Amino acid sequence: TAPVSLPAPHVPPAEPGGRSQPQAGGWSPAQQQPWCPYKVRAEGAAAAGRLCFRPPARGFQCSARACLAHRSPGGALVANALRNGSVLLQWAPPRPAAGLRGFALNCSWDGTYTRFPCDSVELGASCRDYLLPEAHGGVRYRLCLQPRYAPPRPAPPAQCVEFRVEPAAMRDIVVAMTAVGGSICVMLVFICLLVAYITENLMSPAGGGGGASAASRRA
């Protein structure tokens, strides 16, 4: 089971301009609870992707058995590396809150000889966490969160956190056991076929020859 459960409830579809369609009675996602609107910009894409919404991970706490927490130098950004290979980012509300337009999340990871960029994410002002569903084991990541304010207020320095996602040892053990079990099954099938071949082709002629010799001696 996954250490953290993030449900995906129904959210009204967004209009091309990024505004949620109003519902009967004036309902909107912002009035119901602080949904997190975000857009994922793929590496090399000229524009951001479609507008999406996700519920916040309320009350999540990183336990020693379920995940490993990595904090930025300022402590405002926390990367919770979960055992299932995902990473839950959490951050504190920036100060001041007036004029806050949203956040920009930039990602990169270390290769053998150079650093490669990941997909960047644009998040709304109500967002306080974001889930990276899949992270490569054994790779060192660098994530930076930049608050965005309405002009003329300058943006504060970005909060960055670096961490390495350890490979899932249990998953590797399961894969190894599956491979060994498959090899054993193949060997057992081969042995059964070999025994059947020996029984059918070697034992029957010998038994038939012995019966013929006994009949000749009685004659």
Image (cartoon, rainbow, N blue to C red):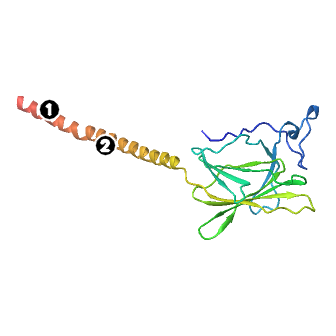
Q: For the residue marked with disc 2, what is the amino acid? A: Leu
Rendered image quadrant of residue 96: bottom right
Residue at the disc numbered 1: 211
**Few, some or many residues within 10 Å of mark 1 (<14, 14–19, 20+):** few
Rendered image quadrant of residue 148: bottom right
Relative side of 193 to 208, left or right: right
Relative side of 15 to 61, left or right: right
- Which mark is on residue 194? 2
The residue at the point 92 percent across, 61 percent down is 151
State which quarter of the image contains the C terminus: top left
Q: Residue 54: x, y in percent?
A: 77, 43
Q: Residue 60: x, y in percent?
A: 69, 42
At mark 2, the secondary structure is helix
Residue situated in front as seen by the camera: 146 or 1: 146
Alpha carbons under labels 1 and 2: distance apart: 25 Å
Q: Residue 86: x, y in percent?
A: 64, 49
Q: Is residue 68 above or below residue 113?
A: above
Q: Residue 199: x, y in percent?
A: 26, 38
Q: Is residue 160 above or below residue 82?
A: below
Rendered image quadrant of residue 142: bottom right
At mark 1, the secondary structure is helix
The residue at the point 54 percent across, 50 percent down is 168
If you read the primary sequence from the N terminus, does the residue marked by circle 1 or circle 2 appear first?
2
State which quarter of the image contains the N terminus: top right
- Image depth: mark 1 or mark 2 in front: 2
The answer to whether residue 119 is seen in the rendering is: yes
Relative side of 135 to 192, left or right: right
Q: For the residue marked with disc 1, what is the amino acid? A: Gly
The residue at the point 18 percent across, 35 percent down is 207
The answer to whether residue 219 is seen in the rendering is: no
